[in-house]
Amino acid sequence: MGWGGGRVLRHRNVVLYLSGVVVSGFGSSVMALVAGVWAKSLTGSDSLAALTTFCVWAPMLLGPLIGTLADLGRRRPLLIWTNLGMAAVLLPLLAVRSGDRIWILFAVLTVYGVSTVLLDAAEAALVATAVPEQLRGDFNGLRMTANEGMKLVAPLLGALLFVRFGGPAVVLLDAATFVLAALAFALVRVSEPSARPAGTRRRGARTAEGIRFLRRHPVLWRLVPAGAVTMGMAGVNGASVYAVVDAGLHRPPAYAGVLYAVQGIGSVVVGLFAGALLRRMPERVFAAAGIMLFAVGVALRVVPSLPVVLFAGVLIGAGLPCVLIAAMTAVQRETPDDLLGRVAATANTLLFAPNAVALAAGAGLLALVDHR
């Protein structure tokens, strides 16, 4: 199939860039799990534990506005200083040792969510400068593979670290990953234009430019909304996982971890070959194929058979990344450099915000209808 991962990994900038993304993603995956466990252990409240996830996800709704910051200057220094800043922002969590200080955790997680949106926008914009165009599909696929691989490993390591040493140990680990990510981005060799003048326009007007460009682009305005709908349905599907395990397979709730692991394997595999596939078909065809795999996988989950449900998980895991990789690769290719931060952040908001909303909708539907 002509796997391009080897060529990607021989490119110095790509290796450093991918290292920065992977190491910070590892720390974020660890913190994503531990934050909820930490809140639960200190307060005993399921609601406050769930609120930790909301704090991280809520800034995604402001993606178009936050992404504007990535277009005001050079992206590499922004990545370096934002990562270093987050390492410092995490340190107040070392003081969270009782329920009366849980507000510090929520405040830090909200800043964490803002920085995640900003880093994603700056990273997507810098890719267009640091990674050759012919390697971007491979790069985005490898990034997806690395992120999914971290999700398989990092939560387990984070849980073990929390149980053995407590929350402060996880904080120090996450802070260290931000420092290492900053170092990796500092070593990237890239020629960027000087800081972009903000002009006399208000920030709202600059934000609207990114939204307007995405709305008027004939390719992006098909790919991104198609991905948004698919991710929304992924949220509904995700809400039904425990019902599939319980009512469908008659297994204990912990077995849901097996389904997530199998889904992660599907995502890892498709990420490895995404670049090669994108060289043989347009992004819209690649995305459509992924949507079909996802749809078939969801449909197969109604069958009360463990082998069938596991196979369905592989199809779901393989299908969803196709839409995301296709959309982001197209955004990086089609968007002018001075708009790329805003457009990338807007695309991320449209792609991922429906997932969080649909999770709640799916939970409500399960109260009314059978999971099938």
Image: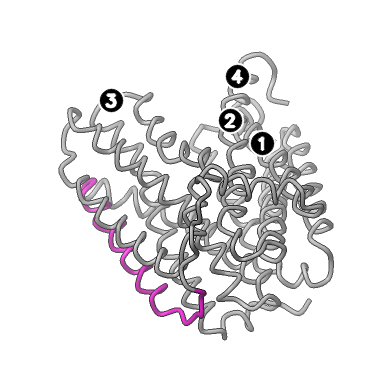
Q: Nearer the viewer, mark 1 or mark 3?
A: 1
Is residue 123 shown to the viewer in this render? yes
Provide the residue designation for mark 1: 232
Residue sitting nearer the eye, 322 or 87: 87
Disc 3 is placed on an element classified as: loop
Q: Which residue is mark 4?
A: 364
Magenta span of residues: 165-193
Marking on residue 357 = 2
Asked if disc 3 and disc 2 are in contact, CB closer than 8 Å, the reply is no
Q: Are marks 2 and 1 in contact (CB under 8 Å)?
A: yes
Does 190 appear in magenta? yes
Q: Which comes sooner in the sequence, label 2 or label 4?
A: 2
Instruction: Residue at 73%, 38% (x, y): give it.
Output: 298
The alpha-carbon separation of the residues under discs 1 and 3 comes to 31 Å
Can you give x and y, in whole percent of width and height, for residue 279 in the image?
79, 72
Residue 21 position, x and y percent, is 47, 65
Residue at numbered disc 3:
44
